[in-house]
Image: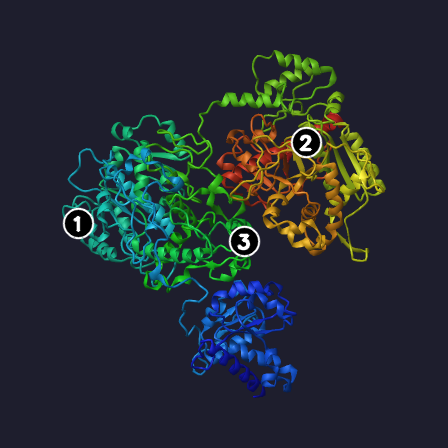
C-alpha cells in the first residue's frame, strides 16, 4: 500500500495538471497524461537503445496536442537527453515529486515500483522493447482493462506488437502476453483476442471519405514509357481511359481503355470460319491445378484463342478455386467473380456460357454431345451426372464430385479435340496465327516464326484445327498445363493483329471494379500519408511510396528465398530515406521485416487496412489481387524472382507506363533483370514477365526494343526477336569458324603460337602467304610440318585439340626479345602483379597454372608469387622448381619469400595457436613492397626510393587464370562498371594516383561494421553507405599505383588482426582491405567485368559469357580472344563447375597434376551445350539439373579450366619429360 499510495499521489497531481489543459480522465480513472519508459542503462540489447530524437520521431503522432504531459520513467539521469521531446511536450519525472508527495520517506529500492504504477495509468504508454520493466507496465495496464491499442514500443520494428494477439510460445521475456490478463475471471481458456482491432493513431489516416485523386489524371492515352504518340496509334482514335465504379475516386488505377478505339470495336478477325456452320463452336477448359496466377496465365491464353477463333468459352463448373489466399470457407468458385466476363463489350468479343448451360444446350437430342450412332455421345445417365457436377465439383481425384469426370467425357467425344499444345510434362510448343497459312495451308516456316518460337515446336492454326466443334484445353493435367505468358506463347504474324490481342488482354482481362476500388482506397491512404511526409506522386497518380513482394512459403525455387537480412541488404539503396514501404507477402511473422523499420522506414501491410478499406466485407480470395494492385503503384518495386505474383505486378507497372528502371528483384544475381534482361524470350519461361507484352502495343508496328533503351531505332513490322537482336546474322557458321581459327593461329591473334627461334620467321612467312583461313586441325598440321614434328593422330580432344602439337602453347615460352618488350605495358606503365601463397602442394600447382595462363595471353609486366612461411628446405625446393619449370616460361615470372604471417596473435602479442592463412595476403604484400629491390623502401625516410611514378601493383589470388591481360586502362566499351543505383555515376577509366580500381565483390557496406577499429579521427567515418557501395565493395584484382598500394597495404596489415578478431571467419581480410582503403581516403573505381567466379554471382562479367553464341561458348573458353567476343580478364575458380559427366573443382585436383606420368583431364564433349548435358555432377555423383543460363556458364568455365590445365600439363610434358614416360591420355576424372 505504501507504494500504491505514493504512486497514486503522483498520478493525481499529473491528472490535475492534465485536466487544466483539457485532457480528460477515463471512467477507470486513468489518463490525463501519457507515459514512457526509457531504458538507458545496462540493457544488453543495444539495438533498442535509441536517441531522444528517434524516441520523438517514432511516437510523435501518438500524443495529443497542445502539449500533452508526458511522464517519463527512466534510468537516464541527464535530463538534457530528453530535450528533443521537451521542445514539444511538458515532461515530468519521478524526481519532480519527491517533496510534493514525500517520496524521501520511502525506501529508495521502491522507487522503480512507484514508476511502474505511475506509467501504467497513462492514456497511452510507450515502452522499451526487451525491458521486463516495460513489460510489467503493459501487464498492469492489462489488469486495469485498458485497450491494447494504447500500448506501444519505441523500437520501430515492435511498435505495434501489443496490438496483435499472441500466445506465449516459450519462455520469452522480451514482452508480456495478453493471456495473462484477458478473461482470467472466467472458467474458459482464452486462446484468442477479446478486443476487436481498431485503427492505430500512429497508423494510416482513417477519414476515407476525404480521399480522392490528388490531382486530375491525364486525358491522353499514352501511358508513361509504354505508350506512343497519338500519331502512331490510330487504333486509339475514339478510345477513352477506363473508370472504376467506387465510392472513392480511384480512376487513376484504371490502366485500361473503356471504350476501346473505333478500329478495335470494329475489328474483323481473319481467323473466323469463312463459311459459318449452323452449330456454334466452343472452347472448354479445365483451369490450371496451381495457384491463381498459374490459372490466370492459362486463362489469358484460352481467352485470346477464343477471341481469335470466334468460339464461345464454356466456364468450368463452380468449384473452390485454389487462390493465393487459402481459406477453408472459400467463396470464389468461378472466374467471373473477379473478371468482368459478363460485360456486354467483352461478350461481343468472346461469348461466355456456364458449364451447366453448355450441357443443357448441347446435351439435347440434336446437340453436339448427343447422337445415338456415336459411341462417345452422352447418354441420359451421363447428362444427369454431369449436370450435377456442373453445379459444383471439386478438383480432388478421390472426391465423389471430381470435376475431372466432366472433362473426361467432353474430351473423349468425337466432336472434340484436345488442344495439341503440349507434349509430356513440358509446354514445348508455340501457337502461331498466320493468315496465309490459315487460308492456303502450311508451307515453309518463316524466319520470323522461327525466331519467335526458338526451340519450341510451332503449332499453326489451320482450317483443320478450326474444324472441330469443341476444342478442349486440358490445362489441369500435368501434360497440358499452359504455363506461359500469352504474348510469349501466341504469335500473330500480322503486327496489327498481334497488338490488337495484347490490347484485348489489357483492356478486358483486368480485375473487377470491386477489387480495384478496395485497392485504390489503400493506395490513396498510403499516398495521403506519404504526401504529408513530403513525398510526391508521378504524373499518372502512382508512387509516393514504394513496394515489395516477399514470397516466403511454397516457392519451389529455393535459391530465390533469401533471408530477412538479405532482403534489406540487397534492396536498401533503392528506397528513399523515411519512405513508406508497402509489403505484399505470405510471411505471417512480421518480425521478418524488422530491418526496414530499423532503418527508418514505415512499413505497411494489407492487414493494416482491413477496417479502413472495408476488406472484411469482401471475398477473402480478393486479398491477393488487392495486394498485387497496391504493390504495382509503388514508386519502386522489388519482387521475388520466379514468382508469377511478382511477375504480374511488373506487367501492371508496364501497363501503367512505369519505367523498367524502377523494378528490381531481391535476389542479387537477377536484381536488374527487368532493366537489363531481354525484351522478349523465345520460350515458355514464366519466371518473370517481358516488356514485349505491354510496350508500344497501341501502335501498328511490332516493337522489338524497349522504348527506354538507348539508341532505340524504332520498330519492325515483321520480326519479333530479343531486344538486343536488331541486326541480321552477318556471319554464317563458316565465317565464325574462320574467325575462331584466326583467333587461335592468325598472325596478329593475341594467342599466337610461339615458335622456337629457328622456325619463327619461316612460320610467319608461310602464314602471310596463306590466302584463306584454315580450320584448326589443318592449320596445326601445316604448322607441325613446318616444325618437322609428327602429328599424333591418336590423341583426341573433344575440342579439336588433337595432340600435344595442337595445343595453343607447344614450344618454349617467350622469345627473349618478346620478354623484354613486355616488361613495360604499351602505355609505359610497369605492372607488378603479385599473388600470395603458402608453400604447400595445393597452391603449388595453382601457381604453375597461373603463370602458364599469364604466358598464354602475354601478360605485360612482372608477376611474382609471394610464398609465405616456407621452411628453409621448402624454400630451396621452391627455388629449384621455379627456376626449372617457371622461369622457362618467362624471365619476368618470379618467386619472393616472406616469413609466416598466418598465426593469430593475442592482445599481448603472443601466439594463440590459431591460424588464419589469409593473413599472408596483407602482410605478405607489405613485406614484398618494403623488401623487394624493385621499390627501394626506405624505412627512415618513409618512402619508396626506386619506384617510378607510373609503376602499378596488382594483387590477385592464386586460384585465378588469366583470360585477357590485366590492364590499367578501362576505357574499352566492353568494360562493365558496378552501378547499383538508378542513376549511374561517371567512372574514371584509368588507374592513377588517387584512383585505384578493384573487382566488384558482394560485400556491400558490411565492412563499415568495423569502422570504429580505424580510430575516432579516421576518414573512413566520413564515408556514407552509398559511397561505400559505390567505391569500396571490392576484392581482387586490386589495382593501384605502387605508392597508393603501399599506403593501403600498410594500413591493411595494421587493421586486419582486429577485424579478424571481431569477425573470426573467412573474408575478414577483405573487409579489412575495404576499411584500410577508406581510412586512406582512396575510393576505388569498381569494375564488374574483370572477373567471373560463381556462375550465379552478380557484379561479375558473366553477361559477356551469356552473349556468346551457344555453339561458340566452349571454344571461347578454350581459346579466349577479345576480338571475337569480349571476355572477363580472369576466371576465379573458387567454385565447382561441371557439365554432363565432367566436373572441375580445385579441391579434387591431384597435387601432382603437372608431372610426366599424370594423365590429362577429361574434357566436355562437343555437344556440351546440348540439353542432354544440362546437368552437373555433385561430389556424391548426384545430378544437379542446370537451367539454361547456368548451363551455359558452366560450359564456359568447365571448357576453359579443363583445357588450360591440359595445355599447361602438355607444356610441362613437352619440356620436362622423356617421350617414353609421358602420359598424354585424357582420362583423369576428378570424381573417379
Category of crowding for the residue at label 1, using alpha-carbon neighbours closer than 10 angstroms: few (below 14), some (14–19), many (at least 20): some
Residue 1061 is labelled as none
Q: Residue 538 appears at what percent x and percent y?
A: 41, 47
Q: Label 2 to label 3, Cα distance in Å?
A: 40 Å
- Whether residue 132 is visible: yes
Q: Label 3 to label 1, Cα distance in Å?
A: 57 Å
Q: Label 1 to label 2, Cα distance in Å?
A: 76 Å
- Residue found at the far front of this picture: 20
Kindly report which numbered mark, 2 or 3, lies closer to the viewer in this rendering. 3
Q: Residue at x 70, y 19 (%)?
A: 755
Q: Quadrant of the N terminus?
A: bottom right
CB under 8 Å between callouts 2 and 3? no
Q: Residue 104 appears at what percent x and percent y?
A: 64, 85
Category of crowding for the residue at label 3, using alpha-carbon neighbours closer than 10 angstroms: few (below 14), some (14–19), many (at least 20): some
Category of crowding for the residue at label 2, using alpha-carbon neighbours closer than 10 angstroms: few (below 14), some (14–19), many (at least 20): many
Residue 568 is labelled as 3
Q: Helix or strand or loop: what does disc 1 sit on?
A: helix
In-image side of 194 versus 44 (left or right): left
In-image side of 125 versus 106 (left or right): left
According to the image, label 1 marks what residue?
361
Q: Helix or strand or loop: what does disc 3 sit on?
A: helix
1076 over 124 or under it: above or below: above
According to the image, label 2 marks what residue?
853
Amino acid at each position: 500500500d505504501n507504494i500504491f499510495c505514493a504512486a497514486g499521489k503522483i498520478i493525481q497531481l499529473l491528472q490535475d495538471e492534465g485536466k487544466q489543459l483539457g485532457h480528460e480522465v477515463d471512467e477507470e480513472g486513468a489518463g490525463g497524461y501519457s507515459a514512457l519508459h526509457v531504458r538507458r542503462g545496462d540493457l544488453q540489447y543495444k539495438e533498442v537503445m535509441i536517441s531522444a530524437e528517434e524516441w520523438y520521431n517514432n511516437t510523435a503522432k501518438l500524443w495529443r496536442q497542445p502539449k500533452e504531459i508526458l511522464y517519463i520513467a527512466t534510468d537516464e539521469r541527464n535530463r538534457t537527453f530528453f530535450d528533443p521531446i521537451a521542445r514539444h511536450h511538458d515532461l515530468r519525472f519521478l524526481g519532480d515529486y519527491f517533496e510534493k508527495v514525500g517520496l524521501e520517506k520511502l525506501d529508495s529500492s521502491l522507487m522503480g515500483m512507484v514508476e511502474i504504477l505511475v506509467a501504467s495509468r497513462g492514456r497511452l504508454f510507450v515502452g522499451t522493447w526487451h525491458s521486463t520493466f516495460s513489460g510489467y507496465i503493459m501487464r498492469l495496464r492489462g489488469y486495469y482493462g485498458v485497450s491494447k491499442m494504447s500500448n506501444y514500443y519505441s523500437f520501430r520494428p515492435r511498435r505495434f506488437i501489443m496490438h496483435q494477439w499472441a500466445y506465449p510460445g516459450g519462455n520469452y521475456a522480451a514482452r508480456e502476453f495478453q493471456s495473462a490478463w484477458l478473461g482470467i475471471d472466467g472458467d474458459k481458456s482464452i486462446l484468442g483476442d477479446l478486443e476487436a482491432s481498431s485503427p492505430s493513431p500512429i497508423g494510416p489516416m482513417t477519414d476515407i471519405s476525404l480521399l480522392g485523386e490528388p490531382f486530375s489524371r491525364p486525358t491522353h492515352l499514352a501511358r508513361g514509357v509504354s505508350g506512343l504518340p497519338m500519331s502512331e496509334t490510330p487504333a486509339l482514335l475514339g478510345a477513352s481511359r477506363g473508370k472504376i465504379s467506387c465510392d472513392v475516386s480511384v480512376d487513376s488505377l484504371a490502366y485500361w481503355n473503356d471504350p476501346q478505339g473505333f478500329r478495335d470495336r470494329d475489328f474483323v478477325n481473319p481467323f473466323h470460319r469463312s463459311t459459318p456452320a449452323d452449330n456454334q463452336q466452343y472452347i472448354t477448359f479445365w483451369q490450371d491445378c496451381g495457384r491463381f496466377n498459374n490459372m490466370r496465365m492459362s486463362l489469358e491464353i484460352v481467352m485470346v484463342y477464343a477471341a481469335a477463333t470466334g468460339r464461345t468459352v464454356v466456364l468450368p463448373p463452380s468449384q473452390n478455386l485454389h487462390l493465393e489466399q487459402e481459406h477453408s470457407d472459400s467463396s470464389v468458385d468461378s472466374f467471373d467473380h473477379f473478371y468482368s466476363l459478363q460485360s456486354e463489350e467483352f461478350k461481343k468479343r468472346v461469348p461466355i456460357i456456364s458449364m451447366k448451360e453448355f450441357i443443357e444446350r448441347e446435351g439435347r437430342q440434336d446437340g453436339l454431345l448427343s447422337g445415338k450412332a456415336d459411341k462417345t455421345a452422352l447418354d441420359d445417365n451421363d447428362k444427369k451426372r454431369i449436370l450435377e457436377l456442373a453445379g459444383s465439383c471439386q478438383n480432388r481425384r478421390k472426391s465423389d464430385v471430381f470435376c475431372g469426370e466432366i472433362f473426361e467425357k467432353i474430351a473423349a467425344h468425337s466432336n472434340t479435340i484436345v488442344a495439341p499444345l503440349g507434349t509430356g510434362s513440358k509446354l514445348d510448343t508455340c501457337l502461331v496465327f498466320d493468315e496465309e497459312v490459315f487460308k492456303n495451308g502450311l508451307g515453309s516456316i518463316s524466319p520470323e516464326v522461327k525466331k519467335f518460337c526458338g526451340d519450341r515446336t510451332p503449332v499453326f492454326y489451320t482450317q483443320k484445327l478450326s474444324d472441330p466443334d469443341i476444342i478442349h484445353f486440358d490445362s489441369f493435367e500435368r501434360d497440358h498445363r499452359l504455363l506461359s505468358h500469352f504474348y510469349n506463347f501466341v504469335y500473330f504474324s500480322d503486327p496489327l493483329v498481334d497488338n490488337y490481342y495484347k490490347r484485348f488482354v489489357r483492356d478486358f482481362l483486368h480485375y473487377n471494379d470491386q477489387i480495384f476500388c478496395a485497392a485504390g482506397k489503400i493506395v490513396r491512404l498510403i499516398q495521403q500519408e506519404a504526401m504529408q511526409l513530403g513525398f510526391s506522386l508521378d504524373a499518372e497518380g502512382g508512387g509516393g511510396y514504394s513496394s515489395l513482394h516477399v514470397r516466403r512459403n511454397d516457392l519451389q525455387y529455393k535459391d530465390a528465398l533469401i533471408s530477412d537480412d538479405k532482403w534489406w541488404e540487397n534492396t536498401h539503396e533503392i528506397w528513399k530515406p523515411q519512405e513508406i514501404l508497402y509489403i505484399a507477402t505470405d510471411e505471417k511473422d512480421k518480425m521478418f521485416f524488422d530491418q526496414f523499420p530499423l532503418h527508418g522506414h514505415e512499413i505497411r501491410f494489407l492487414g493494416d487496412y482491413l477496417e479502413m478499406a472495408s476488406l472484411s466485407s469482401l471475398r477473402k480470395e480478393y486479398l491477393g489481387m488487392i495486394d498485387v494492385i497496391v504493390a504495382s503503384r509503388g514508386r519502386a518495386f522489388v519482387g521475388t524472382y520466379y514468382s508469377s505474383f511478382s511477375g504480374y505486378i511488373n506487367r501492371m507497372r508496364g501497363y501503367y507506363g512505369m519505367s523498367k528502371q524502377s523494378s528490381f528483384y531481391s535476389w542479387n544475381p537477377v536484381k536488374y533483370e527487368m532493366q537489363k534482361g531481354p525484351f522478349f524470350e523465345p520460350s515458355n519461361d514464366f519466371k518473370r514477365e517481358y516488356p514485349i507484352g505491354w510496350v508500344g502495343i497501341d501502335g501498328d508496328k511490332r516493337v522489338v526494343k524497349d522504348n527506354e533503351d538507348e539508341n532505340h531505332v524504332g520498330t519492325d513490322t515483321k520480326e519479333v526477336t530479343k531486344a538486343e537482336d536488331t541486326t541480321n546474322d552477318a556471319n554464317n557458321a563458316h565465317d565464325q569458324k574462320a574467325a575462331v581459327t584466326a583467333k587461335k593461329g592468325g598472325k596478329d591473334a593475341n594467342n599466337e603460337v610461339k615458335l622456337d627461334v629457328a622456325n619463327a620467321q619461316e612460320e610467319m612467312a608461310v602464314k602471310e602467304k596463306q590466302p584463306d583461313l584454315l580450320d584448326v586441325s589443318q592449320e596445326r598440321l601445316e604448322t607441325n610440318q613446318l616444325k618437322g614434328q609428327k602429328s599424333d593422330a591418336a590423341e583426341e580432344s573433344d575440342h579439336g585439340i588433337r595432340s600435344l602439337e595442337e595445343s595453343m602453347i607447344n614450344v618454349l615460352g617467350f622469345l627473349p626479345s618478346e620478354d623484354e618488350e613486355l616488361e613495360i605495358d604499351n602505355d609505359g606503365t610497369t605492372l607488378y602483379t603479385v599473388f600470395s601463397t603458402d608453400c604447400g602442394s595445393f597452391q603449388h600447382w595453382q601457381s604453375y597454372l597461373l603463370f602458364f595462363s599469364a604466358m598464354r595471353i602475354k601478360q605485360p609486366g612482372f608477376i611474382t608469387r609471394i610464398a609465405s612461411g616456407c621452411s628453409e628446405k621448402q624454400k630451396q625446393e621452391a627455388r629449384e622448381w621455379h627456376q626449372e619449370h617457371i622461369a622457362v616460361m618467362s624471365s619476368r615470372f618470379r618467386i619472393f619469400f616472406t616469413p609466416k604471417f598466418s598465426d593469430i596473435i593475442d592482445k599481448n602479442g603472443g601466439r594463440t595457436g590459431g591460424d588464419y592463412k589469409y593473413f599472408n595476403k596483407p602482410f605478405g604484400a607489405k613485406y614484398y613492397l618494403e623488401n623487394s629491390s624493385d621499390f627501394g623502401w626506405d624505412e627512415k625516410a618513409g618512402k619508396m626510393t626506386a619506384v617510378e611514378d607510373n609503376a602499378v601493383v596488382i594483387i590477385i589470388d592464386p586460384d585465378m587464370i588469366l583470360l585477357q591481360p590485366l590492364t590499367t586502362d578501362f576505357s574499352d566499351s566492353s568494360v562493365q562498371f558496378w552501378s547499383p543505383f538508378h542513376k549511374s555515376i561517371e567512372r574514371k577509366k584509368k588507374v592513377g594516383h588517387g584512383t585505384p580500381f578493384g573487382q566488384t565483390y558482394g560485400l556491400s557496406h558490411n565492412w563499415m561494421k568495423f569502422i570504429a577499429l580505424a580510430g575516432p579521427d579516421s576518414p573512413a567515418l566520413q564515408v556514407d553507405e552509398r559511397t561505400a557501395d559505390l567505391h569500396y565493395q571490392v576484392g581482387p584484382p586490386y589495382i593501384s599505383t605502387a605508392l597508393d598500394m603501399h599506403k593501403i597495404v600498410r594500413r591493411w596489415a595494421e587493421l586486419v588482426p582486429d577485424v579478424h578478431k571481431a569477425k573470426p571467419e573467412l573474408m575478414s581480410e577483405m573487409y579489412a582491405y575495404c576499411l584500410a582503403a577508406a581510412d586512406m581516403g582512396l575510393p576505388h573505381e569498381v569494375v564488374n567485368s574483370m572477373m567471373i567466379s560463381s556462375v550465379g554471382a552478380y557484379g561479375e562479367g558473366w553477361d559477356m559469357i551469356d552473349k556468346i553464341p551457344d555453339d561458340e561458348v566452349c571454344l571461347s573458353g578454350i581459346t579466349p580472344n577479345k576480338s571475337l567476343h569480349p571476355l572477363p580478364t580472369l576466371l576465379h575458380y573458387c567454385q565447382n563447375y561441371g557439365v554432363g559427366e565432367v566436373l572441375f573443382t580445385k579441391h579434387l585436383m591431384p597435387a601432382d597434376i603437372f608431372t610426366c606420368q599424370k594423365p590429362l583431364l577429361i574434357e566436355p564433349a562437343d555437344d556440351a551445350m546440348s540439353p542432354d548435358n544440362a546437368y552437373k555432377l555433385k561430389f556424391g555423383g548426384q545430378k544437379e539439373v542446370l537451367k539454361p543460363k547456368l548451363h551455359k556458364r558452366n560450359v564456359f568455365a568447365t571448357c576453359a579450366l579443363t583445357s588450360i590445365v591440359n595445355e599447361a600439363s602438355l607444356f610441362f610434358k613437352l619440356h620436362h619429360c622423356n617421350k617414353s614416360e609421358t602420359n598424354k591420355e585424357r582420362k583423369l576424372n576428378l570424381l573417379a
